[in-house]
Amino acid sequence: MALKVIGAGFGRTGTWSTFAALNRLGFPCYHMQEVILNKANKGHLNFWRKVANSKPGTPHDWDRAFANYTATVDNPGCCVWRELLAAYPDAKVLLTLHPRGAEGWYDSTIDTIYFTENLWQFKILEWLTPFGRKFGDMSRKLIWGRVLAGVMDDRERAIARYNAYTEEVKAAVSPEKLLVFTVTEGWGPLCRFLGVAEPREPFPNLNDRESVKKVIRDVIKGSYMMLGLSIAGGVAVLAALWWWLG
């Protein structure tokens, strides 16, 4: 397979609903959940960590990640949309925007996926688990550092970055290959852009904020468990040393 649709929109711009819509339209779609939840994609996190630790524009074997997909939306694919368009020049670019604008995007992002940076419990997972270290490193360097320029802790600068990025994509992609899209527009613009018939069903409306927050709650539970096990292990070691020295 080759990518036909490259999503350039940031995470938290309706990408989960768009992901479901593209799958429904016959475009197997890549999304962050394919990296961390799809067991068939073992090794993808290592691939994206390598991308994150490479200079922007570095060629990679993109087919390694996208071999079974014809579309991608959300992180981490949106972070390298220019590289993907160079590798798949016949693809179209889909720029998803938050229905409530840059302010709505920022508030949603801070409330959900920015947990890798602002949640101390995730830092415990980074310290104690290989997955935490890999995911934290990839997210920090590729998403929050490279694409969002390290501005997420400053609301005004982050909103300005969102708006500037939107204009960058519009300026870089020819109009006939670009769709600027919000999920509230429904099937029509997306289906016309892709040249496919509209399904006779509502456009997907996934409550991804609640789903992401559930993942965050699971992360918090996991961090407490890991911390508890580490403390228990430490106490056992100290007790053994005390016994041995005594």
Image (tube, rainbow, N blue to C red):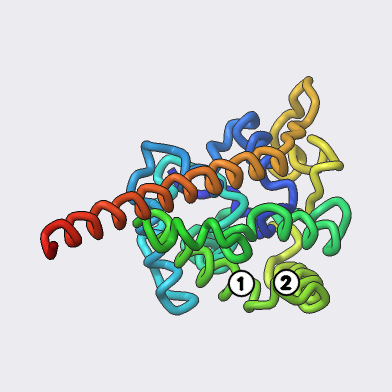
Pick the residue in front: 5 or 97.
Answer: 97
Q: Amino acid at mark 2?
A: Tyr
Q: Nearer the viewer, mark 2 or mark 1?
A: 1
Question: Going from the N terminus, do you reach mark 2 or mark 1 first?
Answer: 1
The residue that appears at 78% across and 21% down in the rendered structure is 201
Quadrant of the image containing the N terminus:
top left
Q: CA distance from mark 2 to mark 1?
A: 9 Å
Quadrant of the image containing the C terminus:
bottom left
Q: How many numbered circles does the render carry? A: 2
Mark number displayed over residue 215:
none
- Whether residue 114 is visible, yes or no, is yes
Q: Position of residue 164 (x, y in %)?
A: 77, 75
Res 6 → quadrant: bottom right
Task: Determine whether the residue tagged by mark 2 lies in a helix, strand or loop.
Answer: helix
Q: Position of residue 63 (x, y in %)?
A: 39, 52
Residue lying at the far top in this picture: please name it.
200
Label 2 Cα crowd, 10 Å radius (few <14 / some 14-19 / many 20+): some
The residue that appears at 52% across and 57% down in the rendered structure is 122
Tell me if 89 is positioned left or right of 12 in this view.
Answer: left
Mark number displayed over residue 165:
2
Q: Position of residue 100 (x, y in %)?
A: 88, 54
Q: Amino acid at mark 1?
A: Val
Q: Are marks 2 and 1 in contact (CB under 8 Å)?
A: yes
Residue lying at the far right in this picture: please name it.
100
Mark number displayed over residue 147:
1
Q: Position of residue 204 (x, y in %)?
A: 74, 32
The residue that appears at 41% across and 75% down in the rendered structure is 54
Pick the residue in front: 218 or 37.
Answer: 218
